Image: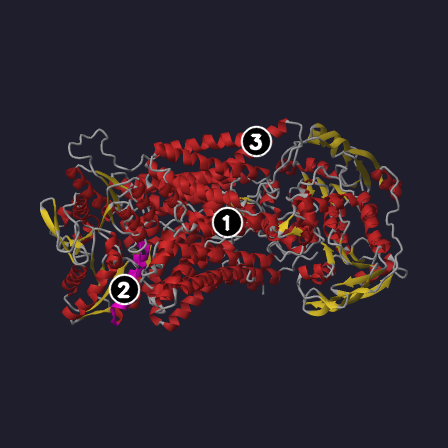
């Protein structure tokens, strides 16, 4: 576990998420005989692939002290660009590249608005959420594109031969692995943590704060586009209202993974474990018989637990250490 | 000035411990109305803990505090204020978005019936400001006020609760001499209004100029209290340090090598203009001048934290691009910033992270930053700077001011710079660490490091610098050699008038 | 010490949330009594999946389906998402696959997005019948048959007739409709040429069908669309809205603004009752969603028993009526009912 | 000069400028935009977002945020209709609406104030939980006009000399909230907490109690706003209020209520809401094709945020000497 996480109690929460994962699998397996089947697990992985990929980039952003609410609209915009260009006769592979480029440009726009014009990222990305969604309507109007090449659509829906892993697992594992490695081991990763803790001191230590943040917004745009490609293939269509509401699920997953909303704290596997356990919990409860409404309440409850539990454990820890003679490590809690 | 017999405030045998550390160890203090009382002592001597006890931030474990004969209600800032005890911290924390009138009456706004009476508040505040001879518009918001003006607002706040004991914690650290004079006259007005004023400072010249009485603290206890008139500066230092302070400013002679840094008529709109100088290897160039004369702005522009409009900066003949700190660093320039907490350090992070953040490039092996490398760098510099710490993973915010400054120095010396710029390197740290820092800097200079030292303390710049560049209101008024420089000359150049503090 | 505490605390907390979840909101699945005397072969498991479970229209749709299930002694579960998106509905299609239902009756929340997942259900041997909203025509073989109210053009042209009646066959007309919905788009395309050919004095605002359609997906957007139409075309004579949400919002706005423009479209009698009774709206029409659910279940069971394969021209029995499959593997219920002052009282209690 | 300096310092100036700019600009292009019916549409359409923006100001001023308002207003608008159709009096149902809102507010407030949890996370969670409970309670049911209390229907349909009663309610609430925020001690503490939380603690402000109070106020007003939504649409379903929360935050930001806390007023929040509604109608009046409207709307919100930021920083430096070291 990287010695880099600043507050010790965050460390316990990563374990907390894994406990939930195990609990969910147990409940699912005993609650319904349909849970622990290969096809169900394959579906669960398929259903969380897009959110997990965007969550990797969102983890960087939130740790650096920023946020991006427009990721779902960027995902839809890249999907719409793929549909639009493919319909206009561009070969599908080129259309995918166009989609990725559009996502990158959208992320760059967010980055420029925040770093060059100094606008607050929460407010700006609410505006670009509307802007990018609007551009989807400009591209496709109300005519979704649905005649996509069957071999690509198969890629979006089938499993890797004789395994229960969908093809989307490959980009997911690759991106998650690289993001984990970069965040916790490389210079850039250190910079992201340090910028989140104190951007002024980072600037004085020669770290190109604006450049790093611009890059993170672009990376988030690109990852949203990658998710857009997978989304397009999975649903075999590009439509202007795709992926509505994804942004809050991504943010809920990142926070459930133990990342502090004020920045400076978080781990990549905490977030990945969180995305996986949310997917497994949803599937388990669904198969056990929960209605969609109950699922909504449970996911809200889990999000609350993800912030209440660390506070409770930290409170207990500080009580116990008060009793012991060991010096009182006053943990500064970011609001 | 009538010194009454009955002490307004008396603290006897105060004890206070945090975890294992005994911050207050039997401190006694007697304050009389109509008297300015200096509280002296090194960092870590327990001064701030004593202040916090008076301010009601926390209770003392044992011992007593009597306020004009009655026990002082402890443990709540509001109760302290209501009992007429007000503490003004070094960096006063006002409400940037609220008007000055509201800042004075925050939390206890004047009311007409149940409703806040804005007109009354503005009238009262304006009256208080006038009484202290300060003309500030009570309707403006506090954001952007200079530190000096912020202190005035805090004093007005104290007056508005007709405080009888006003404690000022190192108020002059960030003030220009004009502002220091204004503060002294305000302190004298308070004394004439029969308040007991406590003045905490490191600057003995100020203590002698202002205070009637003083008390010295060391290692959590009060070691002596005396009328200023019958004690000398060296005796005070001896009481503070408890051991013979070795030579305060050990300037080692050094031979000057070739020019490493060349600055030609550097200018930035509204901040500074036509700054030109050269810096040689092994040379210490002092930047003297009043607070607010633009010295920090110049060095920030050279290092590339801020950009500038005109002029050039070249290192070893090569031009440095504007506003690119990373480029300056790779050219061998380093800047120890003025604001330690906000600009110099990552307070919640560990000593290892703070020290190695500037040299991550060197610690990367096949993309991976080696944690062992980070610890080695931190260990090496902690030893060189004789840092007092428990473990490398301790959060920096738990260390004393002096140790924090050592980490900032270590962090920049680790980049093995050719040119080191230090901005107020020894502000707010104890006398002992100050001399260690000076010895280290002059050793480095002797080994060929080119050094720029921005400082507001005249003895420090006179003691350390080979040449002194004096600035006034953003202009470079003169470069004095070590021989021709003197306190009077610098002050006249810096203030543009012969007025002496 | 703190790690153990964390795990214990998290386990306790999780269990309590779970208990809350289980006790607080009992699963909304209507389990028919377990101890069910099944004389017939093991009763069929049928999943009834609406666009979203909390919408009034689909509650009526499910009622019809449950009636058929009781008659056919099948176990029917009403499951579905709480937001109308393809992605959300796919999660529940997977549940149908995992829980190995025999038949899936579904109203497509997105005409394309659910097709791959329907394909998987078909491969798993599940009989699929779309009802109320179909998948795109190109993907019609991903379901056995689709039960729709009446031919697109009949639904489209009928609404043009109702509007012509209301505005005396003269004046300009606008449309408020949800974007990107297969059935609405089809009906609107049918309205275009029919209006121009049948009613020469009537016209589309802005001169073309394309300009006349204002898109709105929920009550707020529908009210804003109504305001936008009046702002851009103050002399508009009528507004058609082929969706229960849109026509209700238009009626509310017309009454609030006391606007002269006539309003008609597809409306639930229970929702439109007060506007028909007070004359704000003369006539709205709709099919009976109960029939849609009812007939779809019968079609599914017939297909499961092998007596019906959904081929064009074949037919099946539902209750006492027979339905034949026409081109596109679709079975239509017939013309929509119309509700006016006279019969609104009777219909508003049914659905 | 003093007056100009005072005007310059008004936090809501950018919002007001934006309002006038768009009104005149659109009117020039399409004169029918000046007609009273357009003004009426703006005032009529803005009521719901305006009231929620007023409520949201209480928490944003303290550097917090409340995302749960979308679910609260939807749930209470449904409850008012559902309960009154079962015979409860108007007063009873309104009390229930306020209580439901206040309870959600109290839960949010307690978790944020006493457990120190981040308000974005807490209110995102309560957004989901309240929506889930609402869906369960309202499953399949729709509130129709006949179930709506007739007083609310009357309010929704009538105007007072051309000004819709719903907007009059907004103005009344704005005045009450405005006076409280300006004149009551507790409300002034909210600004102090938002401006410098640690100093507020030092000065003896009961920060925890104030945060709880603000969230309860936001919840209660959002609950009450359910009545306005029901009056406006005279119908309610489990889809009511979806997605409103982000629009409300945008209205506050555009109205000069700074996300960084400490400044901004309910007056500005209402201005922001009116500006967003005006943009919507202006896009229609300018004949911008349908499918472009959402994109133009997003672009204009970015411009409004940029304008607000530019003007507020310029106001700061123009009359106050930057703090020099």
Q: Say whether residue D128 is left or right of residue A201.
A: left
Image location (x, y in percent) of residue A244: 38, 53
Q: Quadrant of residue D97?
A: top left
Q: Quadrant of residue B292?
A: bottom right
Q: Say whether residue C346 is left or right of residue A23.
A: left
Residue D119, visible in the rendered structure: no
**Residue neighbourhood size for the residue with mark 2, other residues' Cα within 10 Å, grouped as few (<14), some (14–19), many (≥20):** many
By secondary structure, the bulk of the magenta-drawn segment is best described as helix
Q: Quadrant of residue A252?
A: top left
Which label belongs to residue A176?
1
Identify the residue at the far front of this view: A162
Which label belongs to residue D86?
none
Query: What span is colored magenta in the figure?
Result: C207-226
Q: CA separation, marks 3 and 2?
A: 62 Å
Residue identifier under label 3: C2
Residue identifier under label 2: C213
| Residue ID at (73%, 54%) | B415
């Amino acid at each position: 576990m990287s010695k880099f996480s600043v507050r010790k109690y965050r460390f316990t929460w990563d374990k907390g998420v894994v406990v939930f994962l195990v609990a969910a699998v147990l409940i699912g397996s005993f609650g319904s005989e349909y849970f622990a089947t290969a096809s169900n697990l394959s579906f669960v992985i398929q259903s969380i692939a897009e959110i997990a990929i965007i969550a990797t980039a969102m983890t960087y952003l939130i740790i650096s002290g920023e946020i991006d609410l427009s990721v779902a609209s960027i995902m839809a915009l890249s999907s719409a660009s793929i549909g639009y260009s493919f319909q206009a006769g561009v070969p599908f592979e080129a259309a995918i590249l166009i989609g990725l480029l559009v996502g990158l440009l959208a992320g760059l726009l967010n980055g420029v608005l925040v770093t060059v014009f100094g606008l607050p990222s929460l407010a700006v990305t609410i505006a670009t959420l509307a802007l990018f969604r609007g551009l989807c309507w400009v591209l496709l109007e109300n005519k979704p594109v649905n005649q996509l090449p069957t071999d690509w659509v198969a890629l979006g829906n089938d499993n890797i031969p004789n395994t229960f892993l969908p093809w989307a697992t490959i980009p997911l594992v690759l991106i998650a692995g690289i993001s984990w490695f970069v965040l916790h081991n490389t210079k850039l990763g250190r910079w992201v943590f340090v910028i989140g803790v104190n951007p002024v001191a980072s600037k004085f230590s020669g770290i190109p704060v604006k450049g790093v943040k611009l890059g993170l917004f672009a990376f988030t745009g690109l990852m949203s586009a990658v998710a857009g490609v997978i989304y397009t293939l999975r649903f075999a269509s590009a439509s202007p209202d795709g992926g509505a509401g994804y942004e809050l699920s991504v943010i809920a997953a990142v926070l459930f993974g133990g990342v502090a909303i004020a920045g400076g704290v978080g781990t990549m596997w905490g977030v990945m474990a969180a995305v996986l356990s949310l997917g497994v919990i949803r599937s388990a409860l669904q198969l056990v018989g929960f209605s969609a409404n109950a699922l909504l309440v449970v996911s809200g409850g889990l999000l609350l637990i993800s912030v209440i539990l660390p506070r409770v454990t930290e409170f207990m820890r500080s009580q116990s250490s008060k009793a012991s003679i060991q010096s009182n490590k006053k943990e500064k809690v970011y609001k | 000035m009538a010194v009454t017999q009955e002490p307004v405030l008396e603290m006897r045998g105060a004890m206070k411990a945090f975890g294992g550390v005994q911050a207050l160890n039997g401190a006694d203090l007697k304050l009389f109305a109509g008297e300015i009382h200096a509280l002296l002592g090194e960092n870590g001597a327990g001064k701030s803990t004593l202040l916090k006890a008076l301010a009601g931030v926390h209770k003392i474990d044992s011992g007593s505090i009597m306020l004009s004969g009655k026990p002082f209600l402890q443990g709540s800032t509001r109760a302290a204020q209501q009992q007429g005890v007000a503490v003004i911290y070094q960096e006063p924390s006002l409400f940037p978005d609220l008007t000055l009138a509201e800042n004075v009456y925050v939390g206890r706004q004047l009311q007409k019936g149940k409703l806040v009476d804005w007109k009354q508040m503005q009238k009262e505040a304006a009256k208080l400001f006038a009484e202290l001879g300060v003309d500030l518009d009570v309707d403006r918001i506090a954001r952007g006020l200079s530190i000096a003006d912020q202190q005035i607002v805090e004093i007005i706040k104290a007056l508005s609760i007709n405080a009888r004991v006003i404690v000022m914690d190192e108020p002059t650290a960030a003030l220009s001499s004009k502002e220091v004079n204004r503060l002294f006259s305000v302190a004298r007005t308070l004394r004439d209004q029969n308040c007991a004023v406590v003045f905490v400072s490191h600057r003995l010249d100020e203590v002698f100029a202002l205070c009637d009485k003083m008390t010295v603290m060391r290692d959590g206890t009060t070691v002596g209290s005396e009328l200023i008139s019958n004690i000398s500066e060296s005796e005070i230092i001896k009481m503070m340090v408890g051991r013979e302070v070795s030579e305060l400013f050990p300037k080692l002679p050094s031979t000057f090598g070739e020019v490493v840094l060349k600055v030609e008529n550097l200018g930035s709109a509204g901040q500074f203009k036509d700054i030109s100088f050269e810096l040689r290897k092994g040379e210490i160039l002092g930047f003297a001048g009043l607070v607010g004369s633009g010295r920090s702005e110049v060095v920030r522009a050279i290092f590339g934290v801020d950009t500038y409009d005109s002029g050039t900066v070249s290192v070893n003949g090569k031009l440095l691009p504007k506003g690119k700190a990373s480029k300056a660093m790779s050219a061998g320039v380093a800047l120890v910033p003025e604001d330690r907490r906000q600009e110099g350090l990552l307070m919640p992070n560990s000593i290892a992270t703070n020290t190695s953040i500037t040299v991550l490039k060197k610690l990367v092996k096949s993309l991976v930053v080696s944690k062992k490398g980070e610890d080695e760098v931190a260990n090496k510099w902690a030893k060189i700077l004789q840092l007092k710490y428990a473990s490398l993973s301790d959060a920096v915010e738990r260390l004393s001011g002096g140790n924090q400054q050592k980490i900032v120095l270590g962090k920049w010396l680790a980049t093995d710079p050719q040119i080191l710029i230090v901005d107020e390197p020894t502000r707010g740290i104890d006398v002992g660490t100050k001399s260690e820092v000076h010895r280290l800097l002059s050793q480095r200079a002797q080994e060929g490091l080119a050094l720029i030292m921005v400082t507001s303390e005249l003895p420090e710049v006179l003691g350390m610098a080979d040449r002194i560049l004096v600035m006034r209101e953003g202009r470079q008024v003169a470069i004095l050699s070590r021989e021709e420089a003197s306190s009077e000359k610098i002050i006249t150049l810096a203030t543009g008038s012969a007025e002496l503090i | 010490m703190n790690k153990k505490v964390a795990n214990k605390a998290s386990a306790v907390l999780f269990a309590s949330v779970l208990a809350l979840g289980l006790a607080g909101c009992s699963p909304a699945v209507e389990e028919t009594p377990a101890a069910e005397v099944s004389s017939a072969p093991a009763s069929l498991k049928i999943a009834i999946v609406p666009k979203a479970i909390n919408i009034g229209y689909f509650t009526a749709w499910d009622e019809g389906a449950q009636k058929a299930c009781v008659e056919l002694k099948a176990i029917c579960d009403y499951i579905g998402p709480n937001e109308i998106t393809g992605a959300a509905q796919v999660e529940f299609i997977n549940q149908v696959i995992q829980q190995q239902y025999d038949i899936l009756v579904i109203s497509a929340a997105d005409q394309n997005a659910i097709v791959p997942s329907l394909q998987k259900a078909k491969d798993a041997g599940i009989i699929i019948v779309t009802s109320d909203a179909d998948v795109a025509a190109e993907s019609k073989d991903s379901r056995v048959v689709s039960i729709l109210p009446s031919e697109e053009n009949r639904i489209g042209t009928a609404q043009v007739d109702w509007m012509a009646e209301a505005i005396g066959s003269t004046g300009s007309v606008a449309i408020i409709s949800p974007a990107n919905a297969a059935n609405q788009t089809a009906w609107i395309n049918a309205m275009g040429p029919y209006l121009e050919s049948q009613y020469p004095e009537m016209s589309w605002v802005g001169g073309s069908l394309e300009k006349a359609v204002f898109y709105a997906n929920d009550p707020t957007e529908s009210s804003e669309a109504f305001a936008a139409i009046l702002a851009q075309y103050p002399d508009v004579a009528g507004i058609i809205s082929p969706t229960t949400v849109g026509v209700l919002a238009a009626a509310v706005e017309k009454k609030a603004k006391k606007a002269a423009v006539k309003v008609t479209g597809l409306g639930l009698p229970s929702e439109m009752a007060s506007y028909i009774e007070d004359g704000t709206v003369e006539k709205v029409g709709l099919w009976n969603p109960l029939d849609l659910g009812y007939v779809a279940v019968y079609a599914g069971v017939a297909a499961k028993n092998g007596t019906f394969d959904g081929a064009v021209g074949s037919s099946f029995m539902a209750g006492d009526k027979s339905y034949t499959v026409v081109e596109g593997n679709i079975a239509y219920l017939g013309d929509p009912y119309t509700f006016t002052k006279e019969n609104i009282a009777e219909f508003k209690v049914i659905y | 000069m003093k007056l100009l300096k005072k005007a310059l310092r008004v936090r809501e100036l950018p919002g007001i400028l934006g309002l006038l700019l768009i009104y005149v600009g659109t009117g020039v292009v399409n004169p029918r935009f000046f007609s009273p019916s357009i003004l009426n549409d703006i005032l009529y359409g803005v009521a719901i977002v305006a009231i929620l923006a007023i409520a949201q100001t209480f928490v944003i001023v303290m550097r917090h945020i409340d995302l749960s308002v979308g679910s609260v207003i939807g749930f209470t608008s449904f409850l008012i209709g559902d309960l009154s159709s079962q015979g409860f009096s108007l007063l009873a149902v309104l009390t229930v609406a306020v209580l439901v809102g206040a309870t959600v507010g109290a839960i949010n407030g307690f978790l944020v104030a006493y457990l120190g949890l981040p308000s974005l996370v807490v209110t995102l969670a309560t957004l989901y939980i309240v929506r889930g409970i609402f869906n369960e309670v309202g499953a399949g049911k729709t509130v129709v006009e006949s179930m709506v209390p007739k007083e609310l229907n009357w309010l929704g349909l009538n105007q007072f000399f051309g000004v819709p009663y719903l907007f009059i309610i907004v103005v009344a609430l704005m005045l009450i909230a405005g006076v409280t925020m300006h004149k009551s001690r507790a409300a002034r503490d909210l600004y102090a907490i938002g401006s410098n939380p640690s100093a507020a603690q030092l000065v003896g402000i009961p920060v925890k109690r104030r945060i709880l109070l603000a969230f309860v106020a936001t919840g209660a007003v959002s609950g009450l706003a359910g009545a306005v939504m029901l009056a406006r649409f005279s119908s309610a379903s489990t889809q009511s209020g979806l997605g409103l929360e982000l629009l409300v935050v945008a209205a506050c930001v555009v109205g000069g209520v700074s996300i960084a806390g400490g400044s901004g007023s309910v007056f500005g929040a209402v201005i922001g809401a009116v500006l967003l509604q005006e943009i919507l109608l202006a896009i229609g009046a300018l004949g911008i094709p349908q499918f472009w409207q959402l994109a133009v709307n997003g672009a204009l919100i970015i411009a409004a945020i940029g304008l607000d930021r530019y003007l507020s920083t310029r106001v700061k430096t123009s009359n106050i000497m930057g703090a020099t070291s």
